[in-house]
Amino acid sequence: PEYGTLDEFKALVQNIHQRGMYVIIDWVANHTAWDNVLIAEHPEWYVTDDNGHFIAPPGTNWSDVIELDYTQAGLREYMINAMKYWVTEIGVDGFRCDAVSYVPTDFWREAIAQLKTTRADLFFLAEGDGRQWHTLGFDMTYGWGLYGFGDGVLKSIADGADNADHLHSYAEREKSSYAEQYRMYFTANHDENSWHGTTTELFGDAAELFAVLTATFNGMPLIYSGQEAGLDKRLQFFDKDEIDWRDHPNAKLYSRLLHLKKENQALWNGANGSLLQRVLTNNSPDIFTFIRQKEKDRVLVIANLSDQETSTMLRSTAIAGEYQNIFTDETIVIQDSTTMTLPAWGYAVYEGEAETGVQDRSAPELFDLGQNVPNPFNETTKISYTLAAPSDITLTLFDVHGREVQTLASGSQTAGSHDIIFKADALPSGVYFYRLKIGEKQETKRLLLLR
Protein backbone atom coordinates (compact mmCIF):
# COMPACT_ATOMS: atom_id res chain seq x y z
CA PRO A 1 0.00 0.00 0.00
CA GLU A 2 2.85 2.45 0.65
CA TYR A 3 3.65 2.39 -3.09
CA GLY A 4 0.06 3.16 -4.14
CA THR A 5 -2.53 1.07 -5.97
CA LEU A 6 -2.31 -0.53 -9.39
CA ASP A 7 -4.93 1.89 -10.73
CA GLU A 8 -2.86 4.82 -9.48
CA PHE A 9 0.21 3.46 -11.24
CA LYS A 10 -1.75 2.95 -14.46
CA ALA A 11 -2.95 6.56 -14.24
CA LEU A 12 0.64 7.70 -13.69
CA VAL A 13 1.79 5.85 -16.81
CA GLN A 14 -1.01 7.42 -18.85
CA ASN A 15 -0.14 10.89 -17.56
CA ILE A 16 3.53 10.41 -18.44
CA HIS A 17 2.54 9.30 -21.95
CA GLN A 18 0.40 12.41 -22.35
CA ARG A 19 3.52 14.47 -21.64
CA GLY A 20 5.39 12.80 -24.50
CA MET A 21 7.55 10.56 -22.33
CA TYR A 22 8.00 6.82 -21.88
CA VAL A 23 8.06 4.50 -18.87
CA ILE A 24 10.33 1.51 -18.33
CA ILE A 25 10.18 -0.48 -15.11
CA ASP A 26 12.78 -2.50 -13.26
CA TRP A 27 12.57 -6.23 -13.89
CA VAL A 28 14.43 -8.57 -11.54
CA ALA A 29 14.36 -11.99 -13.18
CA ASN A 30 17.10 -13.67 -11.17
CA HIS A 31 15.66 -13.69 -7.66
CA THR A 32 12.70 -12.78 -5.46
CA ALA A 33 12.09 -11.53 -1.95
CA TRP A 34 11.67 -14.05 0.84
CA ASP A 35 7.95 -13.29 1.08
CA ASN A 36 7.15 -13.73 -2.62
CA VAL A 37 4.01 -15.80 -3.31
CA LEU A 38 6.03 -18.14 -5.54
CA ILE A 39 7.74 -19.60 -2.47
CA ALA A 40 4.45 -21.19 -1.48
CA GLU A 41 3.08 -21.79 -4.98
CA HIS A 42 6.24 -23.08 -6.69
CA PRO A 43 9.03 -23.80 -4.21
CA GLU A 44 10.62 -26.05 -6.87
CA TRP A 45 11.43 -22.93 -8.92
CA TYR A 46 14.11 -21.92 -6.41
CA VAL A 47 17.73 -23.01 -5.99
CA THR A 48 18.40 -24.84 -2.72
CA ASP A 49 21.51 -26.00 -0.90
CA ASP A 50 22.30 -29.59 0.07
CA ASN A 51 19.96 -29.27 3.04
CA GLY A 52 17.05 -28.06 0.94
CA HIS A 53 17.29 -24.45 2.10
CA PHE A 54 16.77 -21.52 -0.23
CA ILE A 55 19.94 -19.56 -1.00
CA ALA A 56 20.94 -16.04 -1.94
CA PRO A 57 22.43 -15.56 -5.42
CA PRO A 58 25.85 -17.28 -5.31
CA GLY A 59 28.82 -14.94 -5.06
CA THR A 60 26.79 -12.11 -3.54
CA ASN A 61 25.87 -10.82 -0.09
CA TRP A 62 22.24 -10.24 -1.13
CA SER A 63 20.75 -11.90 1.92
CA ASP A 64 17.37 -10.20 1.37
CA VAL A 65 16.62 -12.22 -1.80
CA ILE A 66 16.70 -15.85 -2.97
CA GLU A 67 17.82 -17.37 -6.27
CA LEU A 68 15.44 -18.68 -8.94
CA ASP A 69 16.29 -21.86 -10.88
CA TYR A 70 15.84 -21.44 -14.65
CA THR A 71 16.27 -25.17 -15.29
CA GLN A 72 12.83 -25.75 -13.78
CA ALA A 73 9.88 -26.25 -16.14
CA GLY A 74 7.33 -23.48 -16.14
CA LEU A 75 9.46 -20.68 -14.68
CA ARG A 76 10.40 -19.13 -18.02
CA GLU A 77 6.83 -19.10 -19.31
CA TYR A 78 5.63 -17.58 -16.04
CA MET A 79 8.29 -14.86 -16.15
CA ILE A 80 7.57 -13.91 -19.77
CA ASN A 81 3.81 -13.81 -19.17
CA ALA A 82 4.34 -11.60 -16.13
CA MET A 83 6.32 -9.13 -18.24
CA LYS A 84 3.61 -9.20 -20.93
CA TYR A 85 1.03 -8.26 -18.29
CA TRP A 86 2.79 -4.99 -17.49
CA VAL A 87 2.93 -4.17 -21.20
CA THR A 88 -0.61 -5.09 -22.23
CA GLU A 89 -2.52 -4.22 -19.06
CA ILE A 90 -0.55 -1.30 -17.60
CA GLY A 91 1.06 0.14 -20.72
CA VAL A 92 4.73 0.30 -19.77
CA ASP A 93 7.16 0.86 -22.63
CA GLY A 94 9.97 -1.47 -21.65
CA PHE A 95 12.15 -2.90 -18.93
CA ARG A 96 15.42 -2.23 -17.16
CA CYS A 97 16.56 -5.82 -16.64
CA ASP A 98 18.48 -6.25 -13.40
CA ALA A 99 21.67 -8.31 -13.03
CA VAL A 100 21.35 -9.80 -16.52
CA SER A 101 24.55 -11.84 -16.23
CA TYR A 102 23.02 -13.94 -13.42
CA VAL A 103 20.23 -15.19 -15.71
CA PRO A 104 20.79 -17.69 -18.57
CA THR A 105 21.35 -15.74 -21.78
CA ASP A 106 18.97 -17.91 -23.79
CA PHE A 107 16.15 -16.76 -21.52
CA TRP A 108 16.76 -13.13 -22.46
CA ARG A 109 16.84 -13.98 -26.16
CA GLU A 110 13.54 -15.86 -25.85
CA ALA A 111 11.84 -13.29 -23.62
CA ILE A 112 12.79 -10.23 -25.68
CA ALA A 113 11.77 -11.90 -28.96
CA GLN A 114 8.37 -12.90 -27.57
CA LEU A 115 7.69 -9.54 -25.95
CA LYS A 116 8.58 -7.63 -29.11
CA THR A 117 5.96 -9.63 -31.02
CA THR A 118 3.49 -8.20 -28.51
CA ARG A 119 4.80 -4.66 -29.10
CA ALA A 120 7.65 -4.06 -31.52
CA ASP A 121 8.80 -0.76 -30.00
CA LEU A 122 9.43 -2.08 -26.49
CA PHE A 123 12.72 -0.85 -25.05
CA PHE A 124 15.09 -3.14 -23.14
CA LEU A 125 17.95 -1.88 -20.97
CA ALA A 126 20.43 -4.48 -19.72
CA GLU A 127 22.19 -3.90 -16.43
CA GLY A 128 25.35 -5.17 -18.06
CA ASP A 129 28.29 -3.93 -20.11
CA GLY A 130 29.22 -5.67 -23.35
CA ARG A 131 28.20 -6.20 -26.96
CA GLN A 132 26.81 -9.66 -26.20
CA TRP A 133 23.72 -8.13 -24.59
CA HIS A 134 22.87 -6.27 -27.78
CA THR A 135 23.06 -9.51 -29.78
CA LEU A 136 20.40 -10.94 -27.45
CA GLY A 137 18.01 -8.10 -28.31
CA PHE A 138 18.76 -5.47 -25.67
CA ASP A 139 18.56 -1.90 -26.95
CA MET A 140 20.85 -0.27 -24.38
CA THR A 141 23.65 -1.31 -22.03
CA TYR A 142 25.56 0.31 -19.17
CA GLY A 143 28.74 2.24 -19.98
CA TRP A 144 30.50 1.24 -16.78
CA GLY A 145 33.92 1.98 -18.28
CA LEU A 146 33.16 5.70 -18.23
CA TYR A 147 32.00 5.44 -14.63
CA GLY A 148 30.74 2.57 -12.52
CA PHE A 149 31.33 0.84 -9.18
CA GLY A 150 33.22 3.85 -7.86
CA ASP A 151 35.73 3.57 -10.69
CA GLY A 152 36.17 4.30 -14.39
CA VAL A 153 37.63 6.99 -16.63
CA LEU A 154 35.79 9.89 -14.98
CA LYS A 155 36.89 8.85 -11.48
CA SER A 156 40.50 8.54 -12.65
CA ILE A 157 40.38 12.01 -14.18
CA ALA A 158 38.87 13.50 -11.03
CA ASP A 159 41.67 11.89 -9.02
CA GLY A 160 44.30 13.37 -11.35
CA ALA A 161 45.44 9.96 -12.57
CA ASP A 162 44.22 10.35 -16.17
CA ASN A 163 43.54 13.10 -18.67
CA ALA A 164 41.72 14.02 -21.89
CA ASP A 165 43.76 11.59 -23.97
CA HIS A 166 42.51 8.69 -21.86
CA LEU A 167 38.93 9.92 -22.19
CA HIS A 168 39.38 10.14 -25.94
CA SER A 169 40.73 6.59 -26.11
CA TYR A 170 37.67 5.37 -24.22
CA ALA A 171 35.36 7.29 -26.58
CA GLU A 172 37.09 5.74 -29.60
CA ARG A 173 36.65 2.22 -28.20
CA GLU A 174 32.98 2.92 -27.56
CA LYS A 175 32.53 4.19 -31.12
CA SER A 176 34.21 1.09 -32.52
CA SER A 177 32.07 -1.33 -30.51
CA TYR A 178 28.75 0.51 -30.23
CA ALA A 179 28.45 2.80 -33.26
CA GLU A 180 24.74 2.04 -33.70
CA GLN A 181 23.83 0.72 -30.25
CA TYR A 182 22.67 2.73 -27.24
CA ARG A 183 24.95 3.15 -24.25
CA MET A 184 23.89 4.63 -20.91
CA TYR A 185 26.21 6.98 -19.02
CA PHE A 186 25.79 8.47 -15.56
CA THR A 187 27.50 9.95 -12.55
CA ALA A 188 25.11 8.40 -10.01
CA ASN A 189 22.56 5.63 -9.63
CA HIS A 190 21.07 3.66 -6.74
CA ASP A 191 24.18 1.50 -6.26
CA GLU A 192 26.74 4.26 -6.75
CA ASN A 193 25.06 6.73 -4.41
CA SER A 194 24.49 4.32 -1.53
CA TRP A 195 27.66 2.24 -1.68
CA HIS A 196 30.31 4.47 -3.27
CA GLY A 197 29.31 8.02 -2.42
CA THR A 198 27.65 11.19 -3.63
CA THR A 199 28.89 12.86 -6.80
CA THR A 200 30.62 15.46 -4.63
CA GLU A 201 32.41 12.74 -2.65
CA LEU A 202 33.46 10.96 -5.83
CA PHE A 203 34.26 13.80 -8.21
CA GLY A 204 34.58 16.96 -6.13
CA ASP A 205 34.46 20.12 -8.23
CA ALA A 206 34.38 18.04 -11.43
CA ALA A 207 30.88 16.67 -10.74
CA GLU A 208 29.01 19.28 -12.80
CA LEU A 209 31.39 18.96 -15.74
CA PHE A 210 30.97 15.18 -15.74
CA ALA A 211 27.19 15.59 -15.79
CA VAL A 212 27.61 17.66 -18.96
CA LEU A 213 29.83 15.02 -20.55
CA THR A 214 27.42 12.16 -19.82
CA ALA A 215 24.62 14.18 -21.45
CA THR A 216 26.56 14.97 -24.63
CA PHE A 217 28.52 11.74 -25.24
CA ASN A 218 27.40 9.08 -27.75
CA GLY A 219 24.69 7.64 -25.55
CA MET A 220 21.79 8.17 -23.20
CA PRO A 221 22.26 10.05 -19.91
CA LEU A 222 20.79 8.67 -16.70
CA ILE A 223 19.77 11.23 -14.10
CA TYR A 224 19.40 9.59 -10.70
CA SER A 225 16.58 10.58 -8.36
CA GLY A 226 17.36 13.90 -6.73
CA GLN A 227 20.31 14.95 -8.89
CA GLU A 228 18.23 17.76 -10.38
CA ALA A 229 17.56 18.91 -6.80
CA GLY A 230 21.23 18.83 -5.81
CA LEU A 231 21.14 15.52 -3.92
CA ASP A 232 24.08 15.70 -1.52
CA LYS A 233 23.68 12.67 0.73
CA ARG A 234 23.97 8.91 0.47
CA LEU A 235 20.48 7.46 0.43
CA GLN A 236 19.75 4.43 2.59
CA PHE A 237 19.64 1.36 0.35
CA PHE A 238 17.19 -0.82 2.26
CA ASP A 239 15.11 1.76 4.12
CA LYS A 240 12.88 4.66 3.15
CA ASP A 241 15.04 7.76 2.84
CA GLU A 242 13.31 10.84 1.50
CA ILE A 243 14.89 13.28 -0.96
CA ASP A 244 14.82 17.01 -0.26
CA TRP A 245 13.06 18.28 -3.40
CA ARG A 246 14.37 21.83 -3.39
CA ASP A 247 15.07 24.45 -6.02
CA HIS A 248 18.64 24.00 -7.24
CA PRO A 249 20.79 25.20 -10.18
CA ASN A 250 21.06 21.58 -11.32
CA ALA A 251 17.45 21.76 -12.48
CA LYS A 252 18.32 24.40 -15.07
CA LEU A 253 21.51 22.54 -15.99
CA TYR A 254 19.72 19.29 -16.76
CA SER A 255 16.77 21.05 -18.38
CA ARG A 256 19.04 22.78 -20.89
CA LEU A 257 21.04 19.63 -21.58
CA LEU A 258 18.00 17.42 -22.09
CA HIS A 259 16.27 20.01 -24.29
CA LEU A 260 19.40 20.07 -26.45
CA LYS A 261 19.48 16.28 -26.65
CA LYS A 262 15.83 16.10 -27.66
CA GLU A 263 15.86 18.88 -30.26
CA ASN A 264 19.34 18.60 -31.80
CA GLN A 265 19.75 15.57 -34.09
CA ALA A 266 23.50 15.50 -33.52
CA LEU A 267 22.87 14.22 -29.97
CA TRP A 268 20.33 11.59 -30.94
CA ASN A 269 21.25 7.98 -30.27
CA GLY A 270 22.61 5.19 -32.43
CA ALA A 271 22.26 5.50 -36.20
CA ASN A 272 19.81 8.39 -35.75
CA GLY A 273 22.52 10.63 -34.29
CA SER A 274 26.19 11.29 -34.87
CA LEU A 275 29.44 10.02 -33.47
CA LEU A 276 31.68 12.10 -31.25
CA GLN A 277 34.75 13.45 -33.05
CA ARG A 278 37.60 15.03 -31.12
CA VAL A 279 38.72 18.54 -32.05
CA LEU A 280 42.44 19.13 -31.71
CA THR A 281 43.72 21.82 -29.37
CA ASN A 282 47.16 23.09 -28.41
CA ASN A 283 46.99 21.47 -24.96
CA SER A 284 45.20 18.18 -25.51
CA PRO A 285 46.09 16.44 -22.22
CA ASP A 286 44.02 18.98 -20.26
CA ILE A 287 41.31 19.96 -22.73
CA PHE A 288 38.78 17.57 -24.25
CA THR A 289 36.96 19.22 -27.12
CA PHE A 290 34.60 17.35 -29.41
CA ILE A 291 31.97 17.98 -32.02
CA ARG A 292 28.91 15.97 -32.98
CA GLN A 293 27.21 16.80 -36.25
CA LYS A 294 24.16 15.36 -38.03
CA GLU A 295 23.27 17.00 -41.32
CA LYS A 296 23.10 20.71 -40.39
CA ASP A 297 22.80 20.22 -36.62
CA ARG A 298 26.03 20.45 -34.67
CA VAL A 299 27.06 20.54 -31.02
CA LEU A 300 30.52 21.60 -29.85
CA VAL A 301 31.67 20.75 -26.31
CA ILE A 302 34.83 22.13 -24.69
CA ALA A 303 35.84 20.65 -21.33
CA ASN A 304 38.72 21.52 -19.01
CA LEU A 305 39.64 18.23 -17.35
CA SER A 306 42.00 19.79 -14.83
CA ASP A 307 41.87 21.64 -11.53
CA GLN A 308 43.60 24.69 -13.03
CA GLU A 309 42.28 27.53 -15.17
CA THR A 310 43.39 26.72 -18.71
CA SER A 311 43.49 28.62 -22.00
CA THR A 312 43.17 26.59 -25.17
CA MET A 313 43.42 27.15 -28.90
CA LEU A 314 41.10 25.18 -31.19
CA ARG A 315 42.89 23.78 -34.21
CA SER A 316 40.38 22.73 -36.84
CA THR A 317 38.89 24.56 -39.80
CA ALA A 318 36.09 21.97 -39.95
CA ILE A 319 34.33 23.43 -36.89
CA ALA A 320 34.38 27.06 -38.05
CA GLY A 321 31.07 28.89 -37.81
CA GLU A 322 28.65 30.75 -35.58
CA TYR A 323 27.58 29.10 -32.34
CA GLN A 324 25.32 29.86 -29.38
CA ASN A 325 26.22 28.91 -25.82
CA ILE A 326 23.26 26.84 -24.59
CA PHE A 327 23.61 28.10 -21.02
CA THR A 328 24.30 31.81 -21.53
CA ASP A 329 22.73 32.31 -25.00
CA GLU A 330 25.93 34.16 -25.97
CA THR A 331 26.69 34.00 -29.70
CA ILE A 332 30.30 33.57 -30.81
CA VAL A 333 32.12 32.96 -34.07
CA ILE A 334 34.65 30.13 -33.88
CA GLN A 335 37.49 29.85 -36.37
CA ASP A 336 40.67 27.86 -36.67
CA SER A 337 43.01 29.09 -33.89
CA THR A 338 40.17 30.52 -31.79
CA THR A 339 41.38 30.83 -28.19
CA MET A 340 39.27 30.61 -25.05
CA THR A 341 39.88 30.28 -21.32
CA LEU A 342 38.03 27.87 -19.05
CA PRO A 343 38.10 27.80 -15.24
CA ALA A 344 39.14 24.69 -13.36
CA TRP A 345 36.76 21.87 -14.35
CA GLY A 346 35.00 24.38 -16.59
CA TYR A 347 33.02 23.68 -19.74
CA ALA A 348 31.21 25.30 -22.63
CA VAL A 349 28.49 23.73 -24.78
CA TYR A 350 27.70 25.38 -28.09
CA GLU A 351 24.95 24.71 -30.60
CA GLY A 352 25.45 25.68 -34.23
CA GLU A 353 24.35 25.07 -37.78
CA ALA A 354 26.71 23.73 -40.41
CA GLU A 355 26.81 25.45 -43.76
CA THR A 356 27.01 22.14 -45.59
CA GLY A 357 26.18 18.55 -44.77
CA VAL A 358 29.60 17.44 -43.55
CA GLN A 359 29.91 13.69 -43.12
CA ASP A 360 28.94 13.32 -39.48
CA ARG A 361 31.04 10.20 -38.88
CA SER A 362 34.40 11.48 -40.12
CA ALA A 363 36.94 13.24 -37.93
CA PRO A 364 37.41 17.01 -38.39
CA GLU A 365 41.21 16.58 -38.56
CA LEU A 366 43.56 13.59 -38.52
CA PHE A 367 46.39 15.28 -36.65
CA ASP A 368 47.98 18.53 -35.58
CA LEU A 369 51.71 19.09 -36.01
CA GLY A 370 53.25 21.76 -33.80
CA GLN A 371 56.27 23.97 -34.36
CA ASN A 372 59.41 22.65 -32.70
CA VAL A 373 60.52 24.37 -29.48
CA PRO A 374 62.98 26.03 -29.26
CA ASN A 375 63.43 27.19 -32.82
CA PRO A 376 66.15 28.11 -33.76
CA PHE A 377 67.94 25.57 -31.55
CA ASN A 378 71.51 24.66 -30.74
CA GLU A 379 71.52 20.92 -30.11
CA THR A 380 68.16 19.69 -28.75
CA THR A 381 64.58 20.62 -29.65
CA LYS A 382 61.13 19.19 -29.00
CA ILE A 383 58.65 18.31 -31.76
CA SER A 384 55.04 17.83 -30.61
CA TYR A 385 52.02 16.50 -32.44
CA THR A 386 48.51 15.33 -31.59
CA LEU A 387 46.63 12.45 -33.21
CA ALA A 388 42.84 12.52 -33.38
CA ALA A 389 42.69 8.71 -33.49
CA PRO A 390 45.10 5.77 -33.23
CA SER A 391 47.22 5.94 -36.40
CA ASP A 392 50.21 4.56 -38.26
CA ILE A 393 52.58 7.52 -38.57
CA THR A 394 55.94 8.46 -39.99
CA LEU A 395 57.87 11.52 -38.77
CA THR A 396 60.87 12.21 -41.01
CA LEU A 397 63.64 14.84 -41.09
CA PHE A 398 64.85 16.23 -44.45
CA ASP A 399 67.64 18.61 -45.39
CA VAL A 400 67.18 21.74 -47.49
CA HIS A 401 67.69 19.72 -50.69
CA GLY A 402 64.82 17.35 -49.84
CA ARG A 403 67.08 14.44 -48.92
CA GLU A 404 65.93 12.23 -46.07
CA VAL A 405 68.22 12.67 -43.06
CA GLN A 406 66.57 10.66 -40.29
CA THR A 407 63.34 8.91 -39.31
CA LEU A 408 62.31 10.46 -36.00
CA ALA A 409 59.28 8.25 -35.30
CA SER A 410 57.28 5.56 -37.07
CA GLY A 411 54.69 2.89 -36.47
CA SER A 412 51.33 2.63 -34.74
CA GLN A 413 50.64 5.25 -32.07
CA THR A 414 47.72 5.94 -29.77
CA ALA A 415 45.41 8.93 -30.03
CA GLY A 416 46.47 12.01 -28.11
CA SER A 417 49.61 14.07 -27.63
CA HIS A 418 53.12 12.90 -28.50
CA ASP A 419 56.53 14.55 -27.99
CA ILE A 420 59.76 13.74 -29.80
CA ILE A 421 63.08 15.03 -28.41
CA PHE A 422 65.40 15.52 -31.38
CA LYS A 423 69.16 15.68 -30.74
CA ALA A 424 71.12 17.06 -33.69
CA ASP A 425 74.52 15.84 -32.47
CA ALA A 426 76.03 14.96 -35.84
CA LEU A 427 74.32 17.53 -38.06
CA PRO A 428 75.82 20.80 -39.27
CA SER A 429 74.05 24.13 -38.87
CA GLY A 430 71.38 24.87 -41.42
CA VAL A 431 67.72 24.72 -42.38
CA TYR A 432 65.92 21.38 -42.04
CA PHE A 433 62.33 20.23 -42.45
CA TYR A 434 60.31 17.65 -40.51
CA ARG A 435 57.28 15.96 -42.05
CA LEU A 436 54.49 14.04 -40.31
CA LYS A 437 52.64 11.64 -42.60
CA ILE A 438 49.51 9.59 -41.93
CA GLY A 439 48.17 7.72 -44.93
CA GLU A 440 47.88 10.19 -47.80
CA LYS A 441 47.90 13.25 -45.56
CA GLN A 442 51.10 14.98 -44.53
CA GLU A 443 52.31 18.25 -43.04
CA THR A 444 55.79 19.77 -43.10
CA LYS A 445 57.40 22.39 -40.87
CA ARG A 446 60.76 24.16 -40.95
CA LEU A 447 63.41 24.11 -38.21
CA LEU A 448 66.70 25.96 -37.92
CA LEU A 449 69.82 24.47 -36.34
CA LEU A 450 72.42 27.04 -35.21
CA ARG A 451 75.66 25.98 -33.56
Image (spheres, rainbow, N blue to C red):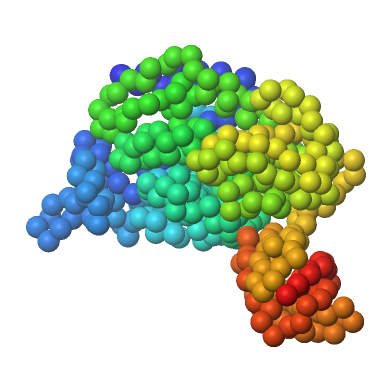
Q: Is residue 439 above or below residue 173?
A: below
The residue at the point 13 percent across, 52 percent down is 53
Pick the residue in front: 425 or 148.
Answer: 425
Residue 118 seen in render: no
**Relative horizontal placement of residue 285, taking residue 244 as reference (left or right):** right
**Relative horizontal placement of residue 150, taking residue 314 as reference (left or right):** left
Q: Is residue 273 above or below residue 363?
A: above
Q: Residue furthest front?
A: 451
The residue at the point 32 percent across, 31 percent down is 234
Q: Residue furthest top?
A: 247
**Relative horizontal placement of residue 446, taking residue 225 as reference (left or right):** right
Pick the residue in front: 164 or 196.
Answer: 164
Quarter of the image for residue 193 reads top left
The residue at the point 82 percent across, 42 percent down is 335
Residue 363 seen in render: yes
Q: Quadrant of the N terminus?
A: top left
| Horizontal and vertical percent position of residue 4 | 37, 18
The residue at the point 76 percent across, 29 percent down is 324
| Horizontal and vertical percent position of residue 14 | 56, 21
Q: Quadrant of the C terminus?
A: bottom right
| Horizontal and vertical percent position of residue 373 | 69, 62
